[in-house]
Image (tube, grey):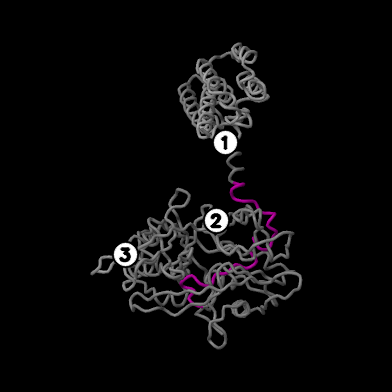
Amino acid sequence: MCFGATSAEPEGWIVVPLTLRLRSPLAVTGRTLGNVVETLDFLPGTYLLPHISKILRSLKVDPYPLFAAGDVAVLPGTRELARRRSLPVPLAFFSRKGEDHTDPATWTNRMLGDTPPGQYKQLRQGYVAVDASNRWVAYASVPTVQRTHNSVDDMSQRPTPEVGGVYTYEAISPVTDGRPTCLRTELRLRKSVAERLKKADSNWWKKLAQTVALGRSKKDDYGEVEVVPSEPCEYALEQDLTNPAAIEADDCREWIVWVLSDVLLRNEYLAPSPCSETLAHELGRRLNVQLSVAQSDDRLNEFVRVRRVESWHTGWGLPRPTLMGIQAGSCIRLRVEGRVDLQRLQEVCAGGIGERTGEGYGRLAVQPVLLTEPLNRWATFEALATQEANQEASQTSLISKDDEDDAWIYEYARLLEREAWKKVILQAVQDFAGSDRRKKDLRWDPHDGENGKPPMSQLGTLRNRIAALRASAQPEINLDWLESLKEKRADRWPDKGQSLEVIHQLLSNSDRNDMWSMLGLQTLPVLTQDGKSELKRELRTWTLQAFFDACIRAHKREKEQTL
């Protein structure tokens, strides 16, 4: 049966990317458990329809027939990841139990029959950003916050069950890793609609840039969102990761379909039917090919979950009908009979299938590269970014001391280097002193004997000697006092004075157990050509003083805690 209206001849689509910058928590009602209202981890396109409608009406275009026919659509807003719009993680992906499920290196694609040994768990939440050309994938979940509120009775001036009592809202956090949270969505229009808008105003899409209130409790401290549009572009199948080359291949008899947004379908009895058979029937009807769910004994052919969406009609003050659809992220393998027209396929992928496509429902990707190739061929975005950063750093020319015309640049760069090194060194020193490596590497034991080994009297002498050192261009430090200490006071140090040998190695210029290696600072960033060697020489004494001062203080604190 036919779902929604479709154009007789595909005319192409125009895409306006939208960035949604959250200025406050965004509460998108998912379900209610007791007195806790949970949020969805995405923003349905329905929430943006009032804002889009207002802009279209200002341009003398009636939006309601366009939304109803699916000629204008707003996709769900998902988390911005790797500077692009993310997509729901495929339910065909499983992660090895006991390992970091956010690392794509631990994933396996069960759609390909890949069943390595061990226990695996399905990835049911989160989003992926994919670059099919560069073969990398990134994964992240959506951060949430919880806020507890109450309803106060006028008479008692306190929360009571009659007026609602105490309740908790879960919402999408406005901050992610110390940065403002951004969602990405798309406004899709048929070319004929875009031409009408362009005639009214050549820069019509810039009118979308406004601050709007979205979601639940938007009159309170929730839902303040800044909409930032980007310049329109023409839709292409590759934007949704559909692979036209794989579909046109002569040996292509099966498709893998990845559901990118919830799909609302009905069967021949007009009842909601969120199942793979109904999706295969409707997709085949739209593409004029015969599709059926693939059957095989050696692999899994469908990973389908159902989402139930409850919503509220604010104007009427009544609940809307419940929506039952195939959940975004579902994956289905379909058997194909016939040849598909790529123009029809582009129309379906851009406009969606099923009901309420104008609200962003019904988006699909056919034969996406991410699901048709083994995951071990894909790199992670973090690894690729690190590699690019290292390549960029290696290609960056360092500042030379010999350039007399730019001597001031060299001096300023050295100042930046010095201060940056000091900050990193101090942090490394504090980390070392507060860890178990201090006792292991220096062999100091505050619990050995009544006063510990070494006692504070010996450490006080050591501190005074180290503090008296002065930065010197000489590679060696005068260690006669340490030799005398090894001869006369070895019994007061752990391991019969062997710990003094560790100190001797640190104070000497020996590379066997150098200070930088112990602190894990073999490589530090530099701006000048001679920065590494010069700063290590210049800051060596300063680093030794900071190191022993921090270790002696930590040793004393641990000893005092046992008294």
Q: Earlier in the sequence, mark 3 or mark 2?
A: 2
Q: Earlier in the sequence, mark 1 or mark 2?
A: 2
SS label for mark 2:
strand
Report x, y in % for residue 440. 63, 32
Quickly name the residue at label 3: 219
Residue 10 visible somewhere in the drawing: no
Depth order, front residue of 520/88: 520
Report x, y in % for residue 273. 56, 81
Which residue lies at the image location 60% right of the left edge and 71% below the top edge? 345
Task: Inspect the image, locate mark 3, and give the three-letter code of the amino acid beneath it.
Answer: Lys
Quickly name the residue at label 1: 435
Q: Residues within 10 Å of mark 1 (few under 14, many from 20)?
A: few
Is residue 475 depicted above or below 383 in this figure? above
Task: Inspect the image, locate mark 2, and give the three-letter code of the amino acid beneath it.
Answer: Ala
Is residue 414 depicted above or below 472 in this figure? below
Question: Which of the labelled discs sits on residue 500, or is there none?
Answer: none
Question: How much space separates mark 1 and mark 2, taking CA atoms?
Answer: 31 Å
Question: How much space separates mark 3 and mark 2, taking CA atoms?
Answer: 30 Å
Report x, y in % for residue 420. 49, 30
Q: Earlier in the sequence, mark 3 or mark 1?
A: 3
Asked if disc 3 and disc 2 are in contact, CB closer than 8 Å, the reply is: no
Asked if disc 1 and disc 2 are in contact, CB closer than 8 Å, the reply is: no
Which residue lies at the image location 60% right of the left edge and 19% below the top edge? 507
Q: Is residue 378 magenta?
A: yes
